[in-house]
């Protein structure tokens, strides 16, 4: 791989809080449901220590975005979040107009809490509503009901000083087209600029994986996707990434940095990082157990993106973007494009899976995205 320019590659920060009230049966994220007195303060000290020990990874860059995820970050006291943000500002680690996002469950969306988040610098929230339908929420074993979901989206839509994204899931056991359509119509009836729309997938390390579940048919899934596209487009929301829809200029900057192959530093138990150095790109994972991370926040499990795996690694990100990206824009972001990547891309053009200009899947290539991406393996 050619000499890289890490100080020129955009970088974001992800902060992982692992605690949840319960384990959702479809979730394979790194979470814990038990918390002892003092754990929160111990984790805060470890996170600050982790940041201080990460200077070589940051490489004199400023974070273009920060994302507090989990787990359920809204279970953490506002003082802990404030101290982390203060540390970032104190050490001049944030770009001007940095996007700072925070995940919440619907039950935690209250006016006083949103006001507190805004007062400490949060300017974007992500609410895990998943559905407005009682039966769908029961099927997902969520800890909120449809009234919690409606109250949360209503309050978020009325809070003009913060950007909001809503998470919805489709392809759930027993879910019908009409109930899914109602979910999208309900979302569109509120003034929200961004939607994360996920198809339910059954991952190996989840509770659902151990059960024999009957999921909607492929034809029903396709109907749901077509219905969503029609309704969202009519309400000026357009797909810009596999699972992301937004109004004009309201894309998540944090997610865009992932898909544009920017760097990201992950801190907190089990957090993932992608870091560029002069001669390599490395993906890292922090120790997953809270107690282990607190003892050694700098320890990571590393895997280098080799020249042989680079093309696929790059394609898995760039090709998620619906409108693609120009080679000129990639050059501006100092993202390396190898000769072998270009050779494979030419093959994709011949197979009508890839467009001629920039890095972008055709309509057919986007529909069969896994096949398109596998051209680069």
Image: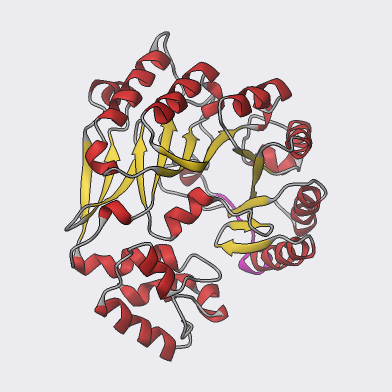
**Residue 2 picture location, percent across and down:** 18, 67
On the rendered image, what quadrant is the C terminus found in? bottom left
Q: Is residue 200 above or below residue 81?
A: below
Magenta stretch holds residue 206: no
Q: How many marks?
A: 0
**Residue 313 picture location, percent across and down:** 32, 63
Q: Residue furthest bottom?
A: 350
Residue occupying the point 46% across, 86% down: 356
**Residue 48 picture location, percent across and down:** 34, 24
Snapshot quadrant of residue 4 = bottom left
Residue occupying the point 40% across, 14% down: 41
Snapshot quadrant of residue 90 = top left
On the rendered image, what quadrant is the N terminus found in? bottom left
Q: Residue furthest right?
A: 189
Q: Is residue 155 above or below residue 198?
A: above
User: Along the horizontal axis of the image, is 263 left or right of 252?
Assistant: left
Q: Nearer the viewer, residue 365 or 238?
A: 238
Q: Nearer the viewer, residue 183 or 179?
A: 183
Q: Nearer the viewer, residue 35 or 251?
A: 251
Q: How is the image coloured?
A: secondary structure
User: Along the horizontal axis of the image, is 310 left or right of 246?
Assistant: left
Q: Nearer the viewer, residue 43 or 24?
A: 43
User: Along the horizontal axis of the image, is 35 left or right of 101?
Assistant: left
Residue occupying the point 25% across, 79% down: 339
Q: Is residue 116 above or below residue 222?
A: above
Which segment did they paint magenta?
213-220
Q: Is residue 191 visible?
A: yes
User: Along the horizontal axis of the image, is 342 left or right of 160?
Assistant: left
Q: Is residue 173 visible?
A: no
Residue occupying the point 40% across, 35% down: 30
Magenta span: predominant SS is loop
Magenta stretch holds residue 214: yes
């Amino acid at each position: 791989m050619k000499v890289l320019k890490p100080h020129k590659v955009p970088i974001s920060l992800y902060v992982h809080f692992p605690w949840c009230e319960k384990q959702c049966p479809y979730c394979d994220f790194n979470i814990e449901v038990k918390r002892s007195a003092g754990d929160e303060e111990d984790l805060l000290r470890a996170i600050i220590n982790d940041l201080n020990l990460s200077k070589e990874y940051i490489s004199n860059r400023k974070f273009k975005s920060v994302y507090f995820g989990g787990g359920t970050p809204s279970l953490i006291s506002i003082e802990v979040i404030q101290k982390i943000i203060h540390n970032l500002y104190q050490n001049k680690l944030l770009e001007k107009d940095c996007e700072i996002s925070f995940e919440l469950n619907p039950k935690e969306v209250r006016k006083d809490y949103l006001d507190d988040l805004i007062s400490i610098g949060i300017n974007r929230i992500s609410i895990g509503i998943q559905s407005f339908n009682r039966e769908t929420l029961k099927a997902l074993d969520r800890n909120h009901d449809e009234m919690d979901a409606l109250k949360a989206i209503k309050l978020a839509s009325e809070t003009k000083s913060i950007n909001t994204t809503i998470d919805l899931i489709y392809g759930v056991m027993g879910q019908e087209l009409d109930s899914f359509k109602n979910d999208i119509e309900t979302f569109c009836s509120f003034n929200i600029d961004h939607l994360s729309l996920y198809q339910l997938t059954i991952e190996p390390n989840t509770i659902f994986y151990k059960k024999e579940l009957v999921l909607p048919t492929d034809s029903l899934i396709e109907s749901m996707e077509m219905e969503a596209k029609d309704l969202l487009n009519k309400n000026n929301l357009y797909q810009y990434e596999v699972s992301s829809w937004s109004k004009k200029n309201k894309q998540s900057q944090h997610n865009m940095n992932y898909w544009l192959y920017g760097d990201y530093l992950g801190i907190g138990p089990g957090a993932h990082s992608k870091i560029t150095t002069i001669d390599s790109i490395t993906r890292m994972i922090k120790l997953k157990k809270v107690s282990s991370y607190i003892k050694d926040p700098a320890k990571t499990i590393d895997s280098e993106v080799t020249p042989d795996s680079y093309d696929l690694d790059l394609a898995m990100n760039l090709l998620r973007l619906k409108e693609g990206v120009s080679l000129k824009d990639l050059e501006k972001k100092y993202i390396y494009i190898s000769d072998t990547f270009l050779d494979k891309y030419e093959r994709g053009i011949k197979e009508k899976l890839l467009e001629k200009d920039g890095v972008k899947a055709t309509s057919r290539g986007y529909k069969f995205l896994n096949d398109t991406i596998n051209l680069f393996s």
